[in-house]
Amino acid sequence: MVNLTRRAFGIGAASVALGALSARMAAAQDVTIVVNGSGGSLAEVLKKLFEDPFTEQTGIKVRATAPVSLPKLKAMVESGNVEWDLTELNGDDVVLATKEGWLEEIDYSIVDPENELPEMAKLPTAMVRASYSTVLGFRTDRFPEDKQPKTWADFWDVENFPGPRSLENSPKCNLEFALLADGVPLDELYPLDVDRAFAKLDEIKDHIPVWWDNGAQHVQLLVDGEVNMTSCWNGRITPLKSEGRPVEISWAGGALLLSYLGIPKGAKHPTEAMQFMKFRMDPVASAEFVKVMPYPGFVPGMMELLEREFVATLPTAPENAEQQFAFNSSWWAENLEEVQNRWNEWLLI
């Protein structure tokens, strides 16, 4: 009869546990999750603060791709050839993708086991990753200090604020900006008056040499001096200002949006993707991320790690939020196809 002493049992149990851990790590070495995002400087920060540490801790490798594309998500899911394990999504993309069945259900017992996230951040098929604003950005060296553009009415005023400008190649937000430039109050934007918006866009169209397609592009347009002003994501300008570039933003009339993370239906590694989503909720790393890219989410404990003065510069700070409108994802999900077709035709005229 074998005499299993307490010490021997402890050594044996530790060996078994170590062996199991080693086996899991070995298996993880063979897994690479593909995470689709916006690219550019944002991707570099994500790699440093989340992707590389996640690989170091779990053995699961992360490969980033860009840009975000709802049509590509649709094509992958419907063809059964799903390349992404996780993708960023805008609010209206979540609505459409969920309706069409292009997203997996998220197991929040994996992603948020302590149930710390607010319910508004936990949709059945997507988790809020961040909040951000699309705002007016401009070069400060192209305008006198006492006469710099602040509103979308200024953006449309080519006589008093001359020079080329840029807008995103999308009707989303541009219709809202056009209506604001035409005098519609922030709280009366929705439902959008599409005809009125396109009539206002007619006035600025000839002054837009480039319609930007991604965040990196609008940054480059400003840095290279190809445009004097552009619509932009607030967090893309922060690094430029830190480098001493002559750029600034105005919160007036900005669009306050939420960004989500979702798992495409048929993803090869959904469990590992959810493990990475949980890893993205680390408050220390999230605070460091927001210092570089001011896109705050709802990570518990993050805001307490940030200086109060810095929090006041974020898009969700009350003094900034009150100058903006909440982007209506539901309206866009319902009307996007029709408005997008009109946008495409309008660009060709």
Image (cartoon, rainbow, N blue to C red):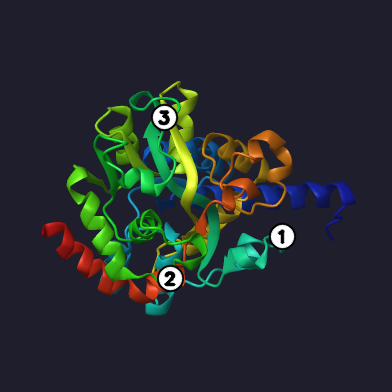
Sort mark 3 into few (<14), some (14-19) or many (20+) by Cα contacts within 10 Å: many
Determine the CA span between mark 3 and mark 2.
Answer: 38 Å
Compared with residue 132, is residue 72 higher up or lower down, i.e. above or below? below
Horizontal relation, residue 114 to residue 254: left or right: right
| Residue 86 in sight in this render | no
Q: What amino acid is labelled 2 in the image?
A: Leu
The tag on residue 116 is 1
The residue closer to the viewer here, 26 or 282, is: 282
Please tell me which residue is depicted at 30% across the width and 48% down the height of the picture: 167
Pointer 3 residue = 247
Pointer 2 residue = 103
Sort mark 2 into few (<14), some (14-19) or many (20+) by Cα contacts within 10 Å: many
Residue extending farthest to the left is: 349
Horizontal relation, residue 17 to residue 195: left or right: right
The C terminus: image quadrant? bottom left
What SS does tag 3 mark?
strand
For marks 1 and 3 on the same chain, the one whose residue lies earlier in the sequence: 1
Sort mark 1 into few (<14), some (14-19) or many (20+) by Cα contacts within 10 Å: few
Q: Mark 1 or mark 3, which is nearer to you?
A: 3
